[in-house]
Image: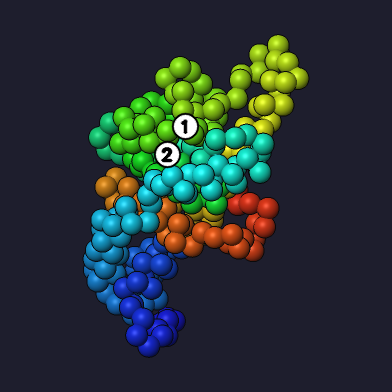
Amino acid sequence: MTVLSLPTGCSKKVLMLLWYMANQNSFRELADKFDVSQSTAHRSILDLLGALCSITSFFIAWPNQCEKRASSAAFSRACGINSIIGAIDGCHIKIQRPIIRGGEYLNEKGFYSVILQGIVDKRGRFLDIFVGAPGKVHDARVLRSSTIYSTLEENMGDFQLLGDSAYIGNAFPFILSPKRNNGALTAEDLAANLKISCGRVIVEQAFGRVKCRWRRVRDLQNTRLDIVVMVIMSACILHNLCAGSTDICEDHPQGCPRQADDDE
């Protein structure tokens, strides 16, 4: 058994949480790694997950006017579309079939999941998250059920978000989506769709980065749904804490793939 040597003054509990989030080890393996009992490891992780989620608003927050203008300028440079402050999408997180109403969690790809809805800025940082909708639910319905939906149009002001074809329709005037390619699109339509795709790739990369760095969220088997939500929220918080202009994955310098997701 190898026991980690801890730096002076560094909290063992914090290191345990980071190890737990970055790996898919069992609690037995985690306990061995940190030379604690399984019950201590389990209790410590749950305590820290709860504490981290209780201060989500400190790390994931809607931008102010100055930040909106900066993000809009960044999107304009990246894809040539003005007045865009973020990109929105849904991401499936694998789970074990819940005992209650389990069929609602079976998504169209054939595995059980909950949905992480994320809105990110041009840096790939989460501006808002909504976690826990069953995998069977369509992205548009998830948005309408989310806590931010009732105030999103007001919060957008004169700006918009980029989204995929799931958000097409009059119900989402604050989301710029590509036109469906029915074979009759003009060259101008195709060029506009390409710009949208170019801009919204940032949310794809954010989900990929979360799953690459915080591997726990790749597959949350044998985990209660309430803890599933806390783990996913914590991964998004840690993502924002780590995100930066120089944050490049050594294994995937061109962008991390979305592991076991609906966009594979």
Which residue position is annotated with label 2? 117
Is 253 on the left or on the right of 140, as rendered? right
SS at circle 2:
strand
- Residue 175 drawn at (x, y percent): 49, 28
Callout 2–callout 1 Cβ contact below 8 Å: no
SS at circle 1:
loop
- Residue 97 drawn at (x, y percent): 35, 39
Q: Is residue 137 above or below residue 234?
A: above
Which residue ends up furthest to the bottom in the rendered image? 8
Q: Is residue 136 visible?
A: no
Q: Is residue 7 above or below residue 134?
A: below
Q: Is residue 5 above or below residue 203?
A: below
Say which residue appears at 38% left-offset and 73% top-offset. 15
Query: What number of labels is visible?
Result: 2
Is 213 on the left or on the right of 8, as rendered? right
Q: Count neighbours of disc 1 (C-alpha within 10 A) and say few if under 14, some if 14 to 19, many if 20 or more.
A: few
Which residue ends up furthest to the top in the rendered image? 184
Which residue position is annotated with label 1? 158
In the image, which disc is placed on residue 88? Answer: none
Amino acid type, mark 1: Asp
Q: Count neighbours of disc 2 (C-alpha within 10 A) and say few if under 14, some if 14 to 19, many if 20 or more.
A: many
- Residue 144 drawn at (x, y percent): 35, 27
Res. 185 image quadrant: top right
Is 211 on the left or on the right of 9, as rendered? right
Q: Is residue 171 visible?
A: yes
